[in-house]
């Protein structure tokens, strides 16, 4: 029993930290509230350490309803990484963004983590759906966290409406799937799946649910407004942890249930990937608000991400996980700078970043490196991750798709360079002087920058992901 | 760390040294950059000497092989599961190109003596750029090659955008986007080669052993050739070049026109013709025709230019056309001419852009009709300009002549896989450019340096300073030495060119399974 408990220790730590914070918050005097963020961070980091400790192990719990293996563990590492960065950003930004008015913020954040962890570990529809809702519904509240702010309220409302619709469609799809197969367990559903018109309907409904979570075109509509309106750390969380959860969800359904069909569904992946990256990139060009801009940027990244489903090949899942790992560090570096700059100056438009390289050269360098990472410029982790994903598309014989994706990277470089241009080429306003950077933000950005530069240069990280998840096709899709 | 890794590491470490120098004094950055590039120059000399001593005994074996023989190889596994390794080494072509780059960056640093605005970032970016260039010339793993290629292209954006002149932001963006879009084609080609070979490796020397089907080669070759052609100013994708070169600061123009454009020819030869000989045979004549347009279009456009930099940029388009023309000729003399032309044009155009920067820094104009008689006040610069001009119109005794005569002879003799009459006629048409070149070079230089001097406007002009004399002197020495003693260069590259030709001449796939 002790061994089994070890396996869900990370979940236990996260859930307990959530409850603990809820109680501590009640008794903490107002002037000590700033201690909540480090407490939450400690909980998350403890869970991360325990995850890394159990990394290669696998097992099942609760009568087979909850499975732990290297793939689920890697996903959990990604979720927690996103949460850790988010908490650090909140810690830095709490005064200005008015988000840490109480401990509830961290409690909700930690509960979404539990939801995401359940989402990837679930083996049957009920747990899966509960995990999904637990990781989504609290986010509605987080998006609308800035009370009295119209944009934030709009963000919350839009997120709720779209989210509810997507959930309803998804539930309908899952219901049909149950009707076809007569099973709740994902692997039994896969075994009993028969091609029928109802399957197509179910698949279409499920894709819309997955597409919502992962911001695939044409289900991405909510992203821009929500990203813009939500408090910036929440936006960062949406773009990293929530996106990882979206991929986890896609893993569960696309591989867990439709695994056998996947090699015949290339056209679907191609279509979604092409549409997502192209639309994300083209619309990002005309954005002025940096958060909206990052929304479209992260939409286009999702388009690259799902290239890993092509094939499927043994290096598919490792490549996607590696890409997400690099993406987590890279995107968090960008959001770190955005939070810091908005905090210090109240500015959030792209052209307002002008002259940053003169006033704060290091911050400008971090931002530039991170943006190059997002654009896929070597030697950043973003490039290596993209290269591996493109390689999968080439392996599947889709050279035109590689061309589309690579040209899209060029387009994305254009808009990322807009920010670099503002920071490096345009002169600063005369009144601007060096802006202070808090120690929390410095640490966060150092970690993120080291990650985004060295993940791709040192082969260790990809190798360990590959070594532990190379058997993903057997584990997930029974192939 | 082997000696080849140091070739890449030295500019990078110099860049770091510049970045982390706490001083705000510009002289520091200059001297660090000069020190780094001088050490590099010495190291390049050592590498050349080592290469010569190691390869001379094997020259006849290397020449008979189907595969380029590498010397001073370092091979460290990187992403092993994907067949990616850190594989660097040199063959004759790499050594030749490394010498070129080493000289041009040294001259470029000297020519940037008067950069004072944000000098730290300037020298750091310049050195990072050149790290990428060295990396491309010595890496024989396609993944590594691509990384260095992009590393060489991207710093250009900031270098032009910050320190440029004129419509610099437009030019910088245009250049970056066109080159990045072309690298997308290269990426498709690299991945296709990787998966097509079936060897699960990005090691270029291994992929060379694959026997790619002809249909495969027929679609990959144009992708790769055009992908690299864009940076080699292949018509009609050359449009980034005049804008980019004319907006860039002096040293950047020198490096870009002198070295970066050579990455195109080098890549087209190494990845294109070497790996995909059958594709090259199919497309040879087509690209020969395109590059003929290149050569003529560039030279005719140069005639009409009023700005000295645009003038040289168009002349570069024409001269880079020679490189790709020679490669597309697909015979020994043509390809040899192409490689020599890469070197000679690199030196020559670096000299041109360096001189333009020096003249502009004094006269504050680059418009040809506004100048006149400057030779009276700056005899050194004028003489250098004339030598560069004469080299570019192919005067015997200078390096340009050796290169162009090779290219034209190669083109004239053509190859067995394409219509000999067509390639003959294309060559004859292309040679017309020599006349046009003579027209624009002589007319332009006569206007700038001869005739009456406007005493009021140009009363305070001075001749070259010592760093400038050193910078131009080194380049002039190369142009002259190469022209008079060309066999050193030819001997250096001959045994490395032979495998490329052997592969073209053999029946497809004879070498497979070695």
Image (cartoon, grey):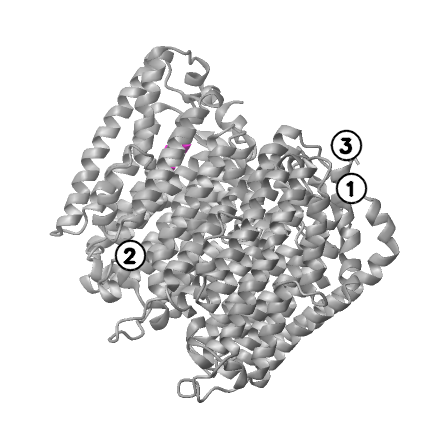
Asked if residue A318 is among those painted magenta in the image, a careful observer would answer no
Q: Is residue A47 something one can see in this rendering?
A: no
- On residue A288, the disc is none
Residue stretch rendered in magenta on the structure? A117-121
Say left or right for A221 vs A327: left
> Is label 2 in contact with label 3 (beta carbons under 8 Å)?
no
When the figure is inspected, residue B257 is found, relative to residue A174, above or below; the finding is: below
Residue A417 figure quarter: bottom left
Say left or right for B471 vs A243: right
Residue B82 rendering spot, x and y as whole percentages: 61, 40
Label the magenta part by its dominant secondary structure. helix
- Label 1 Cα neighbours within 10 Å, binned few <14 / some 14-19 / many ≥20: many
B74 or A66: nearer the viewer:
B74
| SS of the residue under disc 3 | loop
Q: Chain of mark 3?
A: B
- Identify the residue at horizontal 64%, vertical 69% (top origin): B103
Find disc 3 in the rendering and name its residue: B507
Q: Is residue B279 something one can see in this rendering?
A: yes
Quarter of the image that includes the C terminus of chain B: top right
- Identify the residue at horizontal 58%, vertical 68% (top origin): B350
């Amino acid at each position: 029993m002790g061994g089994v408990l070890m396996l869900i220790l990370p979940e236990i730590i996260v859930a307990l930290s959530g409850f603990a914070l809820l109680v501590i918050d009640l008794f903490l005097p107002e002037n000590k509230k700033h201690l909540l963020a480090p407490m939450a961070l400690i909980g998350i980091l403890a869970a991360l350490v325990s995850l890394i400790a159990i990394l290669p192990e696998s097992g099942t719990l609760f009568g087979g309803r909850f499975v732990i293996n290297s793939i689920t563990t890697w996903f959990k590492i990604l979720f927690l990484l996103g949460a850790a960065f988010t908490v650090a950003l909140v810690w830095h930004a709490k005064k200005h963004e008015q988000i840490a008015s109480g401990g509830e913020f961290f409690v909700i954040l930690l509960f979404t983590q539990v939801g995401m962890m359940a989402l990837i570990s679930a083996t049957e529809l009920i747990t899966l759906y509960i995990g999904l809702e637990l990781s989504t519904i609290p986010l509605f509240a987080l998006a609308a966290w800035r009370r009295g702010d119209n944009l934030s309220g709009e963000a919350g409302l839009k997120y709720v409406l779209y989210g509810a619709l997507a959930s309803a469609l998804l539930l309908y799809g899952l219901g049909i799937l149950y009707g076809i197969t007569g099973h709740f367990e994902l692997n039994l559903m896969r075994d009993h799946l028969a091609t029928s018109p109802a399957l197509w309907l179910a698949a279409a409904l499920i894709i819309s649910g997955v597409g919502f979570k992962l911001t695939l075109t044409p289900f991405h509509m909510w992203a821009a407004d929500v990203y813009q309106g939500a408090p910036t750390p929440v936006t960062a969380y949406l773009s990293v942890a929530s996106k990882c959860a979206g991929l986890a969800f896609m893993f569960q359904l696309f591989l867990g249930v439709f695994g056998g069909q996947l090699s015949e569904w290339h056209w679907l992946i191609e279509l979604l990937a092409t549409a997502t990256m192209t639309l994300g990139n083209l619309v990002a060009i005309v954005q002025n608000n940096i958060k909206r801009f990052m929304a479209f940027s992260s939409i286009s990244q999702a388009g690259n991400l799902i290239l890993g489903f092509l094939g499927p090949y043994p290096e598919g899942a490792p490549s996607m996980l590696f890409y997400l790992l690099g993406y987590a560090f890279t995107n968090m570096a960008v959001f770190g700078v955005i939070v810091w700059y908005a905090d210090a100056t109240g500015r959030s438009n792209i052209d307002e970043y002008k002259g940053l390289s003169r006033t704060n050269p290091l911050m400008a360098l971090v931002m530039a490196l991170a943006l190059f990472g997002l654009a896929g410029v070597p030697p950043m982790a973003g490039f290596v991750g993209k290269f591996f994903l493109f390689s999968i598309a080439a392996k599947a014989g889709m050279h035109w798709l590689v061309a589309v994706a690579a040209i899209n990277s060029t387009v994305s470089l254009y808009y990322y360079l807009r920010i670099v241009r503002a920071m490096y080429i345009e002169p600063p306003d005369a009144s601007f002087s060096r802006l202070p950077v808090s120690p929390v933000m410095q640490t966060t950005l150092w970690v993120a920058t080291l990650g985004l530069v060295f993940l791709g240069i040192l082969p260790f990280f990809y190798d360990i992901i590959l070594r532990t998840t190379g058997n993903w096709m057997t584990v997930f899709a029974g192939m | 760390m082997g000696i080849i890794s140091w070739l890449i590491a030295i500019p990078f470490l110099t860049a770091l040294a510049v970045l982390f120098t706490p001083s705000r004094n510009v002289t520091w950055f200059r001297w660090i950059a000069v020190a780094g590039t001088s050490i590099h120059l010495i190291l390049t000399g050592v590498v050349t000497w080592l290469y010569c001593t190691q390869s001379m005994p094997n020259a006849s074996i290397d020449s008979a092989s189907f595969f380029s023989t590498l010397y001073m190889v370092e091979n460290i596994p990187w992403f092993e599961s994907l067949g990616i390794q850190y594989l660097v080494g040199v063959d004759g072509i790499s050594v030749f190109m490394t010498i070129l780059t080493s000289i041009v960056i040294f001259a470029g640093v000297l020519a940037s003596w008067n950069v004072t605005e944000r000098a730290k970032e300037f020298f750091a970016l310049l050195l990072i750029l050149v790290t990428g260039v060295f990396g491309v010339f010595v890496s024989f793993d396609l993944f590594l090659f691509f990384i260095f290629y992009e590393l060489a292209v991207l710093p250009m954006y900031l270098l032009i955008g910050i320190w440029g002149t004129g419509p610099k932001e437009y030019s910088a963006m245009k250049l970056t986007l066109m080159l990045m879009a072309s690298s997308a084609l290269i990426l498709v080609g690299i991945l296709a080669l990787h998966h097509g070979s079936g060897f699960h490796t990005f090691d270029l020397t291994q992929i060379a052993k694959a026997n790619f089907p002809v249909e495969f080669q027929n679609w990959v070759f144009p992708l790769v050739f055009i992908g690299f052609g864009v940076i080699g100013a292949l018509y009609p994708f050359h449009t980034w070049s005049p804008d980019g070169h004319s907006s860039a600061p002096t040293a950047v123009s020198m490096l870009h026109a002198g070295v970066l454009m050579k990455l195109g020819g080098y890549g087209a030869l190494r990845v294109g013709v070497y790996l995909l000989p059958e594709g090259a045979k199919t497309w040879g004549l087509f690209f020969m025709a395109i590059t003929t347009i290149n050569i003529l279009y560039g030279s005719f456009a140069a005639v009409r230019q009023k700005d000295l930099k645009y003038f040289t940029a168009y002349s570069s388009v024409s001269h880079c056309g020679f490189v790709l023309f020679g490669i597309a000729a697909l015979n020994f003399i043509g390809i040899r001419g192409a490689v020599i032309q890469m070197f000679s044009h690199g030196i020559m155009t670096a000299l041109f852009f360096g001189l333009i920067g020096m003249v502009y820094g004094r006269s504050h104009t680059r418009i040809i009709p506004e100048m006149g008689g400057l030779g009276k006040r700056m005899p050194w610069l004028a003489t250098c300009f004339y030598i560069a001009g004469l080299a570019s119109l192919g005067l015997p005794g200078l390096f340009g002549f050796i290169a162009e005569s090779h290219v034209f002879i190669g083109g004239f003799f053509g190859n067995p896989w394409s219509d000999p009459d067509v390639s003959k006629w294309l060559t004859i048409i292309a040679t017309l450019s020599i006349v046009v070149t003579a027209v624009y070079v002589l007319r332009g230089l006569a206007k700038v340096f001869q005739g009456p001097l406007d005493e009021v406007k140009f009363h305070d002009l001075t001749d070259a300073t010592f760093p400038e004399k050193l910078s131009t002197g080194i380049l002039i020495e190369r142009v002259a030495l190469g022209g008079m003693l060309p066999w050193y260069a030819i001997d250096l590259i001959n045994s490395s060119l032979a495998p490329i030709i052997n592969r073209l001449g053999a029946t497809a796939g004879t070498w497979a399974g070695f």
